[in-house]
Image (cartoon, rainbow, N blue to C red):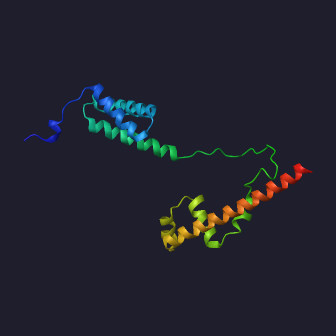
Amino acid sequence: MKSNIDTVPQLSAQELIRQGRNYAYGLTRNLHDAEDLVQQAWLKLIQKYGDVTDRRLLYRAIKNLFIDGVRRSKIVQFDPLENRDFAIGREQSFGSSTDIESMLSVLSDNERTFLKMNVVEGYTASEIAEKTGVPRGTILSHTHRARKKLHRHFDSEFSEHADSEELAVAV
């Protein structure tokens, strides 16, 4: 009895590449990225197996390379700000530690804690709930409320700043 693997028709390299490109385009929605994915997958398979004859193997390699690329793009590299010799006025240096502390002071202790865990430390609501013993829904409502408060606080800070600039220009 023959297995399904033996009955899979052999496709030409051109046909495999065309089908692989269509599959990769479905993942990336960008023709150039799709072509790059197929080329990388093809090279990996050639290096490992010497020949590419199985469409499923090509698709798996394309999918894995795509997932690796998505994961890599989520990693953000930050350059340290060791040398801050540039001159910035107080109104432009929004984000100094005193500014941030004053804005966070409008939040309750729970809101501040949960927001820091979510935004700064990168925990999900489920992870925060697991670590703190507080229900996930409560975490979500506290972080939502904290974001709304900060948004309102930012809006009022910026509108006050804009009003003072308009007065300075008018004088």
Q: Is residue 131 left or right of residue 153?
A: left
Q: Is residue 137 left or right of residue 113?
A: left
Give residue 44's position: percent from left, percent from top.
36, 33
Give residue 127's position: percent from left, percent from top.
49, 65
- Looking at this view, is 137 or 61 the one in front? 137
Residue farthest right in this picture: 171
Question: Visible in this render: residue 50?
Answer: no
Give residue 57's position: percent from left, percent from top.
28, 38
Residue located at (25% from left, 34% from top): 54
Q: Is residue 101 left or right of residue 136?
A: right
Give residue 107's position: percent from left, percent from top.
67, 69
Residue located at (10% from left, 40% from top): 2
- Looking at this view, is 72 or 49 the one in front? 72
Task: Write down the quadrant of residue 158 in the picture.
Answer: bottom right
Q: How many numbered marks are there?
A: 0
Residue located at (74% from left, 64% from top): 102
- Looking at this view, is 77 or 12 the one in front? 12
Q: In the figure, 58 relative to 106: above or below?
A: above
Q: In the figure, 84 relative to 145: above or below?
A: above
Image quarter in which the N terminus is found: top left
Q: Is residue 87 left or right of residue 51?
A: right
- Looking at this view, is 115 or 18 the one in front? 18
Question: Visible in this render: residue 158?
Answer: yes
Residue located at (58% from left, 70% from top): 142
Residue farthest front in this picture: 170
